[in-house]
Image: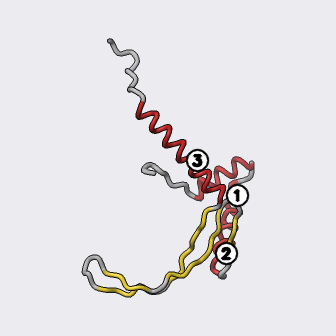
Amino acid sequence: MANARTITKKELVLRIAERTQQKQTITRDIIQLFIDEVIHELASGNRMELRDFGVFEVKTRRARKARNPKTGQEVRVPEKRVVSIKPGKKMKELINRLAAEREAAQNAQAASPPQPASGTPT
């Protein structure tokens, strides 16, 4: 994953608007409404299950003691809530399959001998 790139919401809007032949403003509003609903449900203490994609839920991390790495001083880290996602079956399968294909292509490319540049004298 050394060369993974970040996909922004703007790029996601452009892709979906193009595929659905919908205006970008409408697509952006729908995506934002979806995000707002997920946040609202999680903040209300509910789980959000999106079949094949994953299950989102809020978990509580207990308070704990930690150390400041600079000073070595012990600090108390308070309890906090974090969002957890458990990937769905389809997501896990697709990610693993694509990763395996990418790795196989990289291995094949590394194993093939370099091609001479065209137009160079021999």
Along the line of sight, which residue is nearer the eye, 101 or 23?
101
Res 81 quadrant in image: bottom right
- Circle 1 sits in a helix, a strand or a loop, which is it? helix
**Which of disc 3 and disc 1 is earlier in sequence?**
1
Foreground mark, 1 or 3, reads 3
Res 45 quadrant in image: bottom right
Q: Amino acid at mark 2?
A: Arg
Return the mark for residue 47.
Answer: 2
Residue farthest to the top? 122
**Which of disc 3 and disc 2 is earlier in sequence?**
2
Q: CA distance from mark 2 to mark 3?
A: 28 Å
Q: Are marks 2 and 3 in contact (CB under 8 Å)?
A: no
Instruction: Give the residue at x 50% y 37%.
Output: 105
Q: Amino acid at mark 1?
A: Thr
Return the mark for residue 97.
Answer: 3
Return the residue at label 1. 27
Return the mark for residue 101.
Answer: none
Q: CA distance from mark 1 to mark 3?
A: 29 Å
Q: Is residue 111 above or below residue 74?
A: above
x, y percentage for residue 110? 41, 34
Q: How is the image coloured?
A: secondary structure
- Circle 2 sits in a helix, a strand or a loop, which is it? loop
**Which of disc 2 and disc 1 is earlier in sequence?**
1
